[in-house]
Image (cartoon, grey):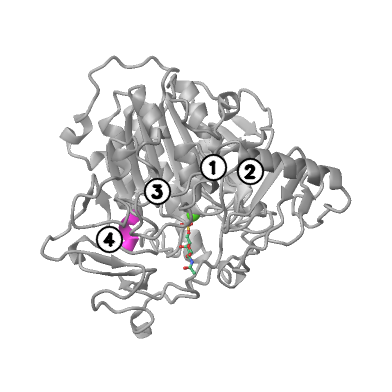
Amino acid sequence: MKTNTCCLLAALPAAALFQGCGDGPRPAAGTRPNVIFIYADDLGIGDLSCYGATKISTPNIDRLAAQGRRFTNAYATSATSTPSRFGLLTGMYPWRQQNTGIAPGNSELIIDTACHTLADALHSVGYATGAVGKWHLGLGPAGGTDFNAEIRPGARDIGFDYEFLIPATVDRVPCVFVEDGHVVGLDPADPITVSYDHKVGDWPTGEENPELVTLKPSQGHNNTIVNGIPRIGWMTGGRSALWVDENIADTITAKAVRFIAQHRDEPFFLYMGTQDVHVPRVPHPRFAGKSGLGTRGDVILQLDWTIGEVMRTLDCLGIADNTLFIFTSDNGAVIDDGYQDRALELLNGHTPMGIYRGGKYSLYEAGTRVPFIVRWPARVRPGEQPALFSQIDVYRSLASLTGAELPATAAPDSRDCLPELLGERQNDREYVVQQNLNNTLAILSGPWKYLEPSDGPALEFWTKTELGNAPEPQLYDLSADPRERNNVAAEHPDVVAELSALLAEVRGAVASTVK
Ligand code: NG6
Ligand code: CA
């Protein structure tokens, strides 16, 4: 494995590097930096060596953290992917809109094209904008995606100039990439059919042909088999377009590098979603077996490589100094997420959730408390950022940084926390709202965390994580009890009343939309 050359840049044709270079003047360093936002998938607060992991080493991400700010109290809005991504890009809490749960692979685009997104904001001040990798916000009109025609609306209809997308998740069909509205490599004579309702076509399924699978499900994941892996949903057609799971990291990293190189001379915003470390965890042979922690560990190494390649690209192009690089995760860690990949047995003492309770899907801390790193050598001084911070504020903070003017209705829940984002101030957000799989909310303020009572379903049989739903209110003093072991609601009725009133106020502050 090459580690010290710009290998991905070198692989690009020279013309690709100069396409799309801006005509306008180059901004001075320190103003309008390039912005790279990388969302890892299901990466836990305990998964990185810069966050205290000792059983795995993530040298590239550690370097990013050492050169920037490492947040220790940062949160995704939600404990699953679709809502967190929705919250980040719209600046509106996803629970205000009904269709923001985990999206199937043929979902319509769930962000209204009339919405002024983070990408719109940066585009409006002259940024070239690109979305690469995991999308999971749906594509196409109401009624779902037609993968055989031009797919619109998509990322290009909500502020991005360029898209190269994994439509949903890597465990959901269709297992193809979409680039600027077209399935990459699709043979029109072999059109794609997708259903999340019933079997389509005659490709084998995990349920009917378990003998054909190379990775067995532990829960669900029993429908169409693609590359030996049984997925969620059924598909047929598009054989020439199917991705190769081992190569996904290489493919999306090369697309990200190409986008950066093409826009090196103008401010750009790259929004990248990695498929790592979501299931199915399929490392390239370069990483297979390298972590000693099974495939979950191997894909953490693969993720670290991706971040290293992006960093190396910035260095090679001489633009690292004026690039604001944000690296975080869409939700917390999960160990068994539906395939028998022996993630639990092979942990070897590794603690993806750190010291925290719960995990992906959960209202407890490990559901939404995530790694969050900000590097911008020209302006951000390295160090720790202990301030309470939510991804919901990335939108207005970046709008403020770049001078983007927003329509009155834009980003209703987002706040300008630029000084906190850049580590220039350590003020806590007054409160942070958390959301679990079934939309039960918690609110965190000062030392306290209040979980609203909920008769939400017990889905632990497949989430393998306690969701945090309980019929009675829960209150934890995170300063004394970060593991959320002692519910002190009965001892502090005044705090319960105060925080439940604050949560009601936040809920009522913006009208909810039904979609
Ligand atoms: C769940 C899947 C899980 C994962 C998750 C979405 C089962 C049993 N579990 O329904 O494997 O795909 O959805 O993850 O099917 S997320 O990170 O994209 O939100
Ligand atoms: Ca996720």
Q: Give the SS element for disc 3.
A: loop
Q: Position of residue 49 (x, y in %)?
A: 58, 48
CA gap, disc 2 and disc 1: 9 Å
- Can residue 400 be seen here? yes
CA gap, disc 3 and disc 2: 21 Å
Binning the other alpha carbons within 10 Å of mark 1 as few (below 14), some (14 to 19) or many (20 upward) gives many
Q: Position of residue 386 (x, y in %)?
A: 67, 35
Q: Residue furthest left?
A: 189
Name the residue type under label 3. Ile
Is residue 336 shown in magenta?
no
Q: In this figure, which residue is indicated by the disc labeled 2?
A: 433
Q: Give the SS element for disc 1.
A: loop
Q: Nearer the viewer, mark 1 or mark 4?
A: 1
CA gap, disc 1 and disc 4: 33 Å
Over which residues does the magenta segment extend?
A: 243-248
CA gap, disc 3 and disc 1: 13 Å
Q: Could you tell which of marks 1 and 4 lies nearer the N-terminus?
A: 1
Q: Give the SS element for disc 4.
A: loop
Q: In this figure, which residue is indicated by the disc labeled 4?
A: 243
- The verdict on label 3 being within 8 Å of ligand 1 is no
Above or below for 102 versus 494: below
Q: In this figure, which residue is indicated by the disc labeled 1?
A: 93
Q: Are marks 2 and 1 in contact (CB under 8 Å)?
A: yes
Q: Nearer the viewer, mark 3 or mark 4?
A: 3
Q: Position of residue 28 (x, y in %)?
A: 38, 14
Q: Tag on residue 110?
A: 3
Name the residue type under label 1. Tyr
Q: Give the SS element for disc 2.
A: strand
Q: Could you tell which of marks 3 and 4 lies nearer the N-terminus?
A: 3
Name the residue type under label 2. Val
For image coordinates 36% across by 36% down, the residue present is 114
